[in-house]
Image (cartoon, rainbow, N blue to C red):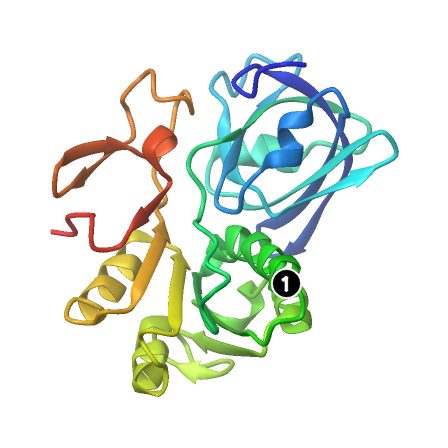
Amino acid sequence: MLHKNSMMSGRIISNREIAKDHFLMSLKVSSAESSFQEASPGQFVMLRVKGRKFPFLGRPLSIYSIYPDDGGFIVELLYRVVGEGTYVISRLKPDEEMYIMGPLGRGFDISPDHSCVILIAGGIGIAPLSFLCEHYRRCAAGRPQKIICYAGVQRSNLLVGLERMEEICSGVRISTDDGSRGYHGLVTELFKNDLSSYGHRDSIIYACGPSAMLKGLAGILKDQSVSCQVSVEERMACGVGACLGCAVRVKSGYKRVCRDGPVFDIHEIVWD
C-alpha cells in the first residue's frame, strides 16, 4: 500500500463544466490506495498532470466525495478555474491519467451529539461541506438531526452543488451578492439574521469560503458560545508541511494550513 503522502496514479472518468469556470472531476484510483477509504471531510488532495512539465507544482483540491467502485475508489473533486494550473486541469479528458496525493490535512471533527448542524459555504467552499454532509447522514443512524446549509455566491449562475445539499439537508438557504437569487447580500448576513433561532448548546457550525467571509463570520460569533470549525483557503506548494509556504497566524503563533489544517476552530485564528 502506498503512503498517503506518495503520488499515485488516477484515471479520469469525467471532467465536465457544471457552471461557468466550475468543474466536477471524477478520478478512479485502485483499491491498493486504501488511504482513501479513511478520508475525512475537510481533507484535500494534491493533483499533478501526468507527463506534463506544467504545472510543476501540485494543485490542492478539496474532496467532494469518495465512494467504492469495482475494486477501487472514485474520488470526486469540485473545483473552480482560478489560474493557469487549474485551467490545464480543466482541459483534461476522460481516460487521461493524473498524479494524486492524499488524503491530506486535518479534516472536520464530526459531532453526532449535536441536534442542529449548520453549514456555511462561500462559493466553491460548498465542496468539503457536501462531503461533510454525507458523513453526517451516515453517522446519524436514524437519530433526529437537523442540517441547515447556507450557500452564498456572487450571482446565481455560479451556484453549484445544491442538488446534493437539497437531498440531504433539512433546509438550504441561498444568498447572492447581486440579488439574482435568494437573499440579496452576503451569506454571513443571511446567517446572522437567523442566528438567534438556533440553540447554541445544541448547534455546531462548519464553514468554508474566502477569508473575507470567514473573518466576517468570526466577528459575528465573537461573543457567542456556539462551536464553529472553518476550512481556510490558502495557497499550497507541497501539501505536506515541508515548504512552510501556507502558514496562518493563530493565537499561539503560526500553523501550517496543509498539515495542521485546513480545518481550524474559528476562535483560534487571528483574523486581523
Q: Which residue is mark 1?
A: 137
* 112 relative to 255 in the view: left or right: right
- Amino acid carrying label 1: it is Arg
Instruction: Categorize mark 1 by other alpha carbons within 10 Å: few (<14), some (14-19), many (20+).
Output: some
Q: Looking at the rendering, which quadrant does residue 100 occupy?
A: top right
Residue found at x 32% / y 72%: 188
- Residue 191: where, in percent of width, then height? 36, 77
- Residue 103: where, in percent of width, then height? 55, 31
| 265 lies above or below 122 | above
Residue found at x 56% / y 45%: 79
Q: Secondary structure at mark 1?
A: helix
| 161 lies above or below 75 | below
- Residue 256: where, in percent of width, then height? 29, 30
Residue found at x 77% / y 24%: 30
Q: Looking at the rendering, which quadrant does residue 245 occupy?
A: top left
- Residue 115: where, in percent of width, then height? 48, 74
Q: Looking at the rendering, which quadrant does residue 192 occupy?
A: bottom left
Q: Residue furthest right?
A: 70
Residue found at x 63% / y 48%: 23
Quadrant in which the N terminus appears: top right
| 178 lies above or below 135 | below
| Numbered marks: total | 1
Front in this rendered view, residue 220 or 198: 198
